[in-house]
Amino acid sequence: MQKVTTVIIGAGQSGLAMSRDLTSGGVDHLVLDRGAVANAWRKDRWDSLRLLTPNWANGLPGAPYPGSCPDGYMPVAEFVRWMNAYANMIDAPVQRDTEVHRVTGTATGFNLETSSGPISCQTLVLASGACARPHVPPSCAAVPSGILQLTPATYKRPHDLPPGGVLVVGASASGTQIAREIQATGRPVTLAAGWHTRLPRTYRGRDVEWWLDTLGILDERFDVVDDLQRARRTPSPQLVGGPDPVDLNALQDCGIEIVGRLADIRDGFALFSGGLANACASADLKMNRLLSTIDEWVAERGLDNELPPPDRPGPTRLPGTPILNRSLGDGAIRTIVWATGYRPDFSWLELPVFDARGRLRHHGGVVAAPGLYAMGLNFMRRRRSHQISGVGEDARDLSAHLRAFLDGRIETAA
């Protein structure tokens, strides 16, 4: 059996950031991945995807963005190359093509059963992230057999789809981008929108990410939020890696039909909620609260004359008559894309560290088992924890906790 002090599961940005810190702290470790470095970015993303955050926000610990276009948005293929270069730069001990089948606890740590053989370790870092498994609702089982069903992990390009209409379910970042891309090929597209996060790409001449960073919103800590579980469920914003808007107004302008949340599929019909107006009103309200906060920050610093004036998007327009159902049996819809979010995948973790809903129990990434840690989860330690820009600080904090545990200064999980 292979023995090592620490195993990191996942060679994405979170796993590599933790590897760098453990190397600096003198902790011998191994990084396992089911494929290669940045495997999920390489295999489970569609072709045209660009990062939602500007390039200046995508540096990794000890390695700022190296290119000449800080305000651009990096294609995924370029990001994969950047991640590979980073892994080589920090000399990360990555063991490729290693699937983890089972993790169990021992008196001194953990045993891992993997496709490359058994491994034992004292401490374990779960760095497979928040987007390991696309979430598809149970109603997918009622979709007629002639309709192609995809997720953002299996959708690659519009021309792979059969001719005919497309129903995209979910109006967060993935759903809005995919809907717009498919509609541009001439296919009729219907977007089912539930609760969503509306943000402008830019406001008063600055990228919205710049504002979130400058106002300290992304650095808000998990232990000061009133309703942390609600904050962790916040949908990803309706943004694209570029200047074009993809909110519901922009999508309607290009011909996409907007309906309410998909409530069920029954007797060959897709049934939509009548709550679209409420979802849009809530999204507009929250967006305008943020923009008001920005305006107040500008005014307090006397910068009104140095920045462009407020340029708020108008209210979300609603269809004249709500559409409450759509036939799936008449051949008009040939494809459904389930852009209904992602979930972590810890199905191989055989430890009592899950709550009644199957969620990993952790306190800022310190999991409810001694020596077990997580990285890359939504709002794990800070609002930016799931972003590329958030992995450095989280790795610093958790690697310090891990080393203290190994040194005997911390005996139990937080």
Image (cartoon, grey):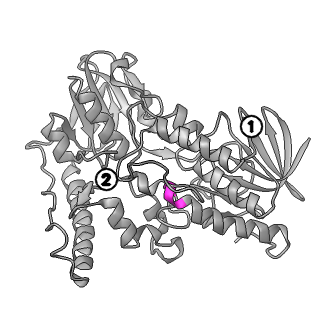
Rendered residue at 39%/39% (across/down): 339
Quadrant of the frame with the C terminus? bottom right
Circle number at residue 101: 1
Magenta segment main secondary structure: helix
Name which quarter of the figure residue 348 lies in.
Answer: top right
Lower position in the chain sequence, tag 1 or tag 2: 1
Q: Residue at x 43, y 63 (%)?
A: 230
Range shown magenta: 386-390
Element at label 2: loop
In magenta segment, residue 387: yes
Nearer to me, 369 or 271: 369
Task: Please give the label number shown on residue 195.
Answer: 2
Residue lying at 54% horizontally and 38% vertically, measured from the top left = 81
Q: Count up the numbered dots.
A: 2
Circle 2: residue type: Trp
**The residue under label 1 is which amino acid type?**
His
Residue 54 is a magenta residue = no
Give the camera-side residue of 198 and 89: 89
As drawn, which residue projects farthest toward the right? 1
Q: Quadrant of residue 113?
A: top right
Residue 366: x and y in percent read: 67, 65
Give left or right: position of 331 versus 210.
left
- Residue 152 numbered tag: none
Q: Is residue 363 above or below residue 69?
A: below
